[in-house]
Amino acid sequence: MSSLSQLRPAIESVSRLLQDAINLISQYSWIYDTKMTEVFITQPWKHMDSTWLDFLQTLSMKEIHDLPTTIIENGPDTLQVFFNQARLCDKRSDKEVFDECSLPEPIKVRYIVNSSYSHNIGMVL
């Protein structure tokens, strides 16, 4: 029973991550619903804040490529908020979520992965 109480921080962290991701995707669904093969048909830029479009048109291809990982200077605040929210969800989606829990790694794996696979994973780790 104590193992379950030790998992509570990790469970709550995963729950917060999922809720933040759901909020991001629902708020910016026009981005995530666009299939790259249909970008000229669905025209997602019509849903984009005009300040985003004006700013993005001033950037080089390299600057656009680097947008997800850089701080936007002189750009719209709402665009910076979007990237900050996306980075937060991305950063928290990795192993760090489970590091909040103080259980040893093999026990974490057993709770997350089907028990028939935990032995094999334990051998690899």
Image (cartoon, rainbow, N blue to C red):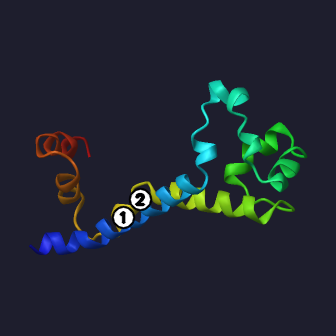
| Residue identified by numbered label 1 | 15
Expressed as whole percent of the image width and height from the top left, the position of residue 23 reads 51, 60
Is 53 displayed left or right of 47 in the figure?
right
Q: As shown in the figure, which amino acid type bears the numbered disc 2?
A: Leu
Residue at the outermost left position: 1
| Drawn side of residue 4 relative to residue 12, left or right | left
Amino acid type at image mark 1: Ser
Residue ID at (33%, 70%)? 12
Q: Eyeballing the image, is 73 above or below 121?
A: below
Q: Nearer the viewer, residue 104 or 13?
A: 13
Marks 1/2 in contact by CB < 8 Å: the verdict is yes
- Which residue occupies the foreground of this view, 5 or 95? 5
Q: Position of residue 46 (x, y in %)?
A: 76, 43
| Residue 14 screen position, x and y as percent | 36, 62
For residue 116, side relative to residue 11 (left or right): left
The secondary element bearing badge 1 is classed as: helix
Residue drawn where x is 17% and y is 59% of the image? 107
Q: Name the mark on residue 18.
A: 2
Q: Nearer the viewer, residue 72 or 40?
A: 40
Position of residue 64 relative to residue 4, above or below, is: above
**Residue at the (63%, 44%) spot, across then down:** 31
Q: Residue 40 location in percent, x, y? A: 73, 27
What's the mark number on residue 53? none
Is the residue marked by circle 1 packed among few (<14), some (14-19), or many (20+) residues within 10 Å?
Answer: few
